[in-house]
Image (cartoon, rainbow, N blue to C red):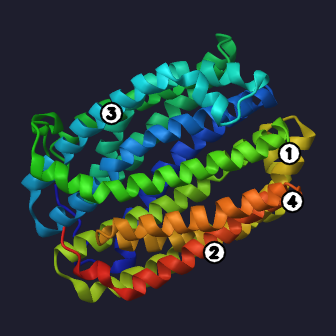
Amino acid sequence: MKKFDYTNAPILKSLLRLALPSMGASFFSSIYNLIDTFWIGHLGADQVAGVTLAMMIFYYGSIFNDLFGTPSVIMISRRYGEGNYEEVKWVVGQTILAKITLGTIFVIFAYIFLGPMLTLIGANKSTFTYGVDFLKWRLWVIPLSFAGYTMMTTFRGTGDSYKLFWVQGISAGINVLLDPIFIYSLGMGVSGAAIASDISEIYLLVMGVILLNNEKSYVKFNPFKYIRPRSDIIKKMVSLGIPSVFDTFSANFVYTIVLRFASVYGADLVAALGIVNNIRSISFTLGFSMNMSTSTMIGQNLGAKKSERLKKIILASVWLGELLIAGYVFALFFFGSQITYFFTPNDNVAMMGGIIMKFFAINEIFFIIAMIGYGVLTGGGLTKTTMMIGIISDWLVLAPLVIIFSILHMRWEFLIFAFVVQSVVMAILAIFEVKKGKWIEQKI
């Protein structure tokens, strides 16, 4: 198959070729998250709150995915830009080996301490049972999900983005079709939502392996032939991945603190945050897609020693990202309550959701800039720098503001305002670090 050359093709065309299929693929994932929210939301506020709290534990498992996921994208794009395709195969194989191993360890730990963890993050008598019902079906698939994500990051790192689009689109379609069947027709409630997600993620893994073995793949191989441990690759990925782990853990833990304080205001606020967080998956989709597209472009062009293209890539990414998110920001600000009401019959939850989304409409403008900055720094291998930006914005900005506002018994809207301040700080720090230029000389 003829491969697209991201180191010589026009920059805007290259970014669009990477970003649009990636956004489409992530958008499909966002759709099935929203469908989950829609069906669960009509079960009741306690069910939504229980699943929201349960997902925090699931997100902690993503730490182990990040330990090897982020480094794999960095190394795949850099090796691919260098033309070292055999090393690309080894990076993918080692990533799968590490993710399945660590994912299994996390699942065992989570099942043992499931009850105490839910209580710790704020589950009460009304929400605890729903959290357990969701997680007992959702946790076991984590190792397989992590392996499936590796297939997708391989497509991203090599620039083979159209396969990513179709595989994730069909996976989301499976989830959308199965949700009402398991939740309502079979009467399984939140457990049914978990099972539907499990099936769709297993499909992701199976199709990923099939497509990597296909003749049309940018790098054709069977990833499971490269899982014999190679200490040099593992060590390199760990050194690049540990900062990402701390960053993810920091963000998840701070969000747990926010939910803990939010739970004091009642289940309606927790439910509203859960719904808005799923609606925000669209902005996460845009931010993540621009982050990964920028990271891939930076990595491949650094590997090919095309430093003259780097500044143009950054500027084009920022303009493209802000242009793509403009319509979404408009919808959040002016139609937030109507959008939230679609996912819940509870008037108070919908009202809170509308107010929350006005804050996040402003937030997303800075969030996109921060994500693109992260993409530049990550593509250059400066994961420690992105970790420090995350820790500063989490622990010196978001957490203190939330705690202070709560101690002073201020209105719940101030908790949401803290997120906006956090994103502004993240964007400023990311711009500052990109301008310093250390990511250009970093060796991978």
In the picture of the structure, the residue carrying the numbered disc 3 is: 205
Closer to the chain start, of discs 2 and 4, is 4
**Residue 408 badge:** 4
| Labels 1 & 2 near each other (Cβ < 8 A) | no
Mark drawn on residue 350: 1
Q: CA distance from mark 3 to mark 1?
A: 36 Å
In the rendered structure, which amino acid carries the disc numbered 4?
Answer: Leu
User: Residue at the spot x=82%, y=42% of the render?
Assistant: 264
Q: Do residues under tags 2 and 3 come within 8 Å of each other at their CB atoms?
A: no
Instruction: Point out the tag, 3 or 1, that comes first from the N-terminus.
Output: 3
Q: Are discs 2 and 4 less than 8 Å apart at CB? A: no
* Residue under label 2: 424
Q: What amino acid is found at the position of numbered circle 2 in the picture?
A: Val
Give the camera-side residue of 351 and 32.
351
Residue 83: which quarter of the image?
A: bottom left
Quadrant of the drawing holding the C terminus: bottom left
**Crowd rating for badge 2 (residues with CA inside 10 Å; few <14, some 14–19, many 20+):** many
Where residue 376 sits, quadrant-wise, is bottom left
